[in-house]
Image: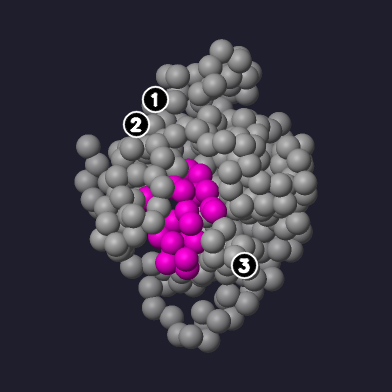
Amino acid sequence: MLEDKSEDIGYIKKLFYEYLRKYGDIKRLDEEGRKNPFIGIGRFAVLKEYWDEFSKIYDSHEEKTLGETVDDCLFWEILESHLPKERNARILDAGGGTGRCTLPLLKMGYKVTLSDFSSGMLEVARKKLVKENLVDRVEIEEANIMNLPFADESFDFVLCMGGAISCAYPPRVASELVRVLKKRGKIFADAINRYYVGVYGFGGNPQEALQMVKSGHPVFLVPKEFEKLFQSKGIEVSHLYGYGGGGPSGLGILDLLPSEIIKARKWNDETFSRLMELMRYLSKEPSIIGLAGSLILIGEKT
């Protein structure tokens, strides 16, 4: 059983990436996918158990480092610049977990449906929504992201963050996200970057890391693969960004900076402002995006 300690967070993230690598045999995934929409009921059950357990510490409120603060601010800047202008737009927060995106979106006035396959994560979200007096304004649905219980073209904007695509079978997830999105609606999704995972894991298993970078992986994607995946589903991709997000360390490009800077607990406004300016530029620079921990894709359904 996990205790509510900050060191547990890093440990369980490590276990999660080890789990994805262990069960990342694309042949096996394909074979099981043909038999079961959940890509193997055993794998689904284990992954659900993981997130139910992780929900107990997922929203740890320890003081953020400079790197984590910049990463979080960068994400919200990007998201807010692509949200629908109409506040009555219907948004799906698919794989939304504890409501980290849902709560701010509700406060902005949007209509949000929060879905996740982890009852533990959704229970944490429900308690937060009750505390903020927002629970009556949101639909909460326990659902597998590869078999969403929503009608075709139900949402104006589909949000899928936190590496949810890389926790399942990306082609199936992409199909479902696009299916429930209205025509001319926007999708905003992220995926864990295979190049970053490979480099990050080189110290633990160099051979496995090299194979992952060169030969591919069923759930970890690189920029071109991520774009092609959604283009094949009828999405016209307009933007691709790189940031930390679901990366193993949660920092991605920021890992290139000296550790004393990104791990700082105190900083001045000028340092923060300059670092934000740097990240705004690098997050959309094609030659840099491949180094990011996670990739953010924005596109429109044609």
Is 252 in front, or is 192? 192
| Dot 1 alpha-carbon crowd within 10 angstroms: few under 14, some 14 to 19, many 20 or more | few
Count residues near mark 2 (Cα–Cα under 10 Å), then give few for <14, some for 14-19, many for 20+.
some
What type is the residue that disc 2 sits on?
Answer: Glu
**Residue placed under numbered mark 1 in the picture:** 45
Horizontal and vertical percent position of residue 266: 39, 78
Label 3: how many residues lie within 10 Å, few (<14), some (14-19) or many (20+)? few
Say which element carries label 1: helix
Residue at 62% over, 67% down: 85
- The reply to whether the C-beta atoms of the residues labelled 2 and 1 are less than 8 Å apart is yes
Q: 28 or 96, which lies in front?
A: 96
In the rendered structure, which amino acid carries the disc numbered 3?
Answer: Lys
The residue that disc 2 covers is: 49
Mark 3 secondary-structure assignment:
loop
> Can you say whether 29 is above or below 167 in the image?
above
Mark 2 to mark 1: distance in Å?
A: 6 Å
Which residues make up the magenta segment? 90-114
Q: Is residue 152 visible?
A: yes
